[in-house]
Image (cartoon, rainbow, N blue to C red):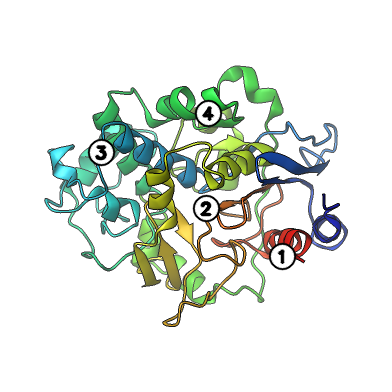
């Protein structure tokens, strides 16, 4: 069994020279958790030490959990990705959009014209039903916030569950002992680390995105502020945000649980083969209307985009083109790799600016594969 020399070295570098405060990284390989590192502090006050049980809000990493609820529910009633949404949700604004297209960010509902609150579920759903789509398939564009409400409503209508977060705990997390939450109970509050925002640097690789993100009237800015609320990192450090159960950005958990979740999927131990195929198979690949860079998505999972020859443009999810998962704002990252039987999870509380994994995460991923594959 490997000693994960390269991974441990990358992890140490993050604390030595990359401003890491508290962080965990974990790896699942071929049926077991083979690495779990945890170090640092839960806050800048340095009163409570960081452990493998420290819970961390991880923003859009939540999308990889939330989309699995939709896929699991579809599979349970023997329906496929070609189901048209209006048959499940009569008020849905686009009559022919399928569940697969929605999950792969082809729906054109990333931004809302109405100013509605992230705290008012019914108000957001009403606004979505009235919204004109910004594009049609096969174009795609990342839905940073509305995605969670769209998926939540689909799960409620498919299953009768009160919320997607409730379905996640009952059907997936609890039966498999996963310390992952979309709606955190009060009993777990003491385990939650404090998040700190990243600072803008001149070396960002996402310059075009940030120019649009800061431009009034841009689709990118509108998408990241629709619905309104929870715009600052400080707002994520309060129990109201932890309890809200927002499926696009409100998940909380540990690195070990994320690695276990994706490792179980990669090894075929969590969902059916059909669900894993849905997660693995890219549905879109190319220019993203919101992120303004190449992206690729399967049914609910992000993948590394590829060029015309099928070669990866990025390796955020490791070397395999079969790998899938989802990063979160600030640097948290998790994925599964069926080809190599790997699950990976990384969470931290000192964020960096960026919608894609930064060097703290990508160095860890490179280290994992150097250790496992040589």
Task: Tell which tag, 3 or 2, sits nearer the viewer.
Answer: 2
Q: Secondary structure at mark 4?
A: helix
Q: CB under 8 Å between callouts 2 and 4?
A: no
x then y, percent, for residue 188? 64, 22
Of the pair 198 and 93, the residue shown nearer to us: 93
**Marks 4 and 3: CB-CB under 8 Å?**
no
Is residue 371 among what the camera can see?
yes
> How far apart in space, not on screen, are marks 3 and 2 (Cα)?
26 Å
> Between residues 147 and 175, which one lies in front from this camera angle?
175
Q: Position of residue 58 (x, y in %)?
A: 58, 44
On the image, the x and y values in percent for residue 152 come to 34, 36
Say which label, 4 or 3, has the lower sequence index. 3
Q: CA distance from mark 2 to mark 4?
A: 17 Å
Q: Tell me the residue that label 1 is attached to.
A: 366
Is 3 above or below relative to 69?
below
Q: Are circles 3 and 1 on residues that touch, CB within 8 Å?
A: no
Q: Residue 125: which numbered mark, if any?
A: 3
Identify the residue shown where x is 84% and y is 34%: 49
| Residue positioned 33% across, 57% down in the render | 105
Badge 2 or badge 4: first in the primary sequence: 4
Q: Which mark is residue 325?
A: 2
Q: Is residue 348 above or below residue 182?
A: below
What separation in Å lies between label 4 and label 1 (alpha carbons)?
A: 28 Å
| Residue at 25% in and 67% down | 138
Please give the label number shown on residue 173: 4
């Amino acid at each position: 069994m490997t000693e994960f020399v390269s991974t441990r070295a990358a992890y140490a570098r993050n604390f030595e020279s990359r401003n890491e405060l508290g962080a965990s990284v974990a790896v699942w390989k071929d049926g077991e958790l083979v690495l779990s590192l945890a170090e640092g502090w839960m806050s800048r006050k340095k009163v409570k030490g960081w452990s493998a049980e420290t819970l961390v809000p991880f923003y859009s990493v939540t999308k990889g959990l939330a989309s699995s609820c939709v896929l699991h529910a579809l599979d349970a009633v023997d329906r496929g990705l070609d189901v048209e949404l209006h048959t499940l949700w009569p008020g849905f604004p686009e009559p022919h959009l399928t569940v697969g297209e929605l999950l792969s960010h082809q729906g054109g509902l990333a931004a809302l014209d109405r100013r509605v609150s992230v705290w008012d579920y019914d108000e957001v759903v009403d606004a979505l039903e009235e919204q004109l789509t910004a594009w049609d398939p096969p174009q795609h564009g990342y839905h940073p916030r509305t995605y969670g409400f769209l998926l939540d409503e689909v799960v409620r209508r498919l299953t009768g569950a009160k919320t997607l977060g409730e379905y996640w705990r009952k059907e997936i997390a609890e039966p498999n002992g996963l310390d992952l939450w979309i709606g955190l109970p009060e009993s777990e509050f003491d385990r939650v680390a404090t998040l700190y925002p990243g600072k803008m640097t001149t070396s960002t690789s996402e310059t075009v995105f940030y120019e649009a993100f800061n431009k009034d009237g841009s689709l990118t800015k509108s998408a990241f502020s629709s619905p309104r609320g929870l715009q600052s990192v400080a707002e994520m450090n309060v129990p109201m945000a932890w309890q809200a159960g927002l499926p696009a950005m409100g998940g909380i958990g540990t690195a070990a649980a994320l690695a276990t979740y994706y490792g179980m999927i990669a090894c075929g131990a969590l969902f059916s083969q059909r669900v894993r195929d849905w997660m693995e198979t890219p549905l879109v690949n190319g220019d993203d209307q919101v992120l303004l860079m190449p992206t690729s998505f399967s049914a609910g999972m992000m993948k590394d985009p590829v060029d015309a020859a099928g070669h990866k443009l990025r390796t955020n999810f490791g070397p395999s083109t079969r790998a899938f998962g989802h990063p979160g704002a600030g640097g948290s990252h998790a994925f599964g790799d069926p080809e190599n039987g790997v699950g990976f999870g990384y969470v931290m509380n000192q964020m960096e600016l960026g919608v894609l994994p930064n060097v703290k995460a990508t160095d860890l991923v490179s280290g994992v594969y150097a250790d496992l594959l040589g």
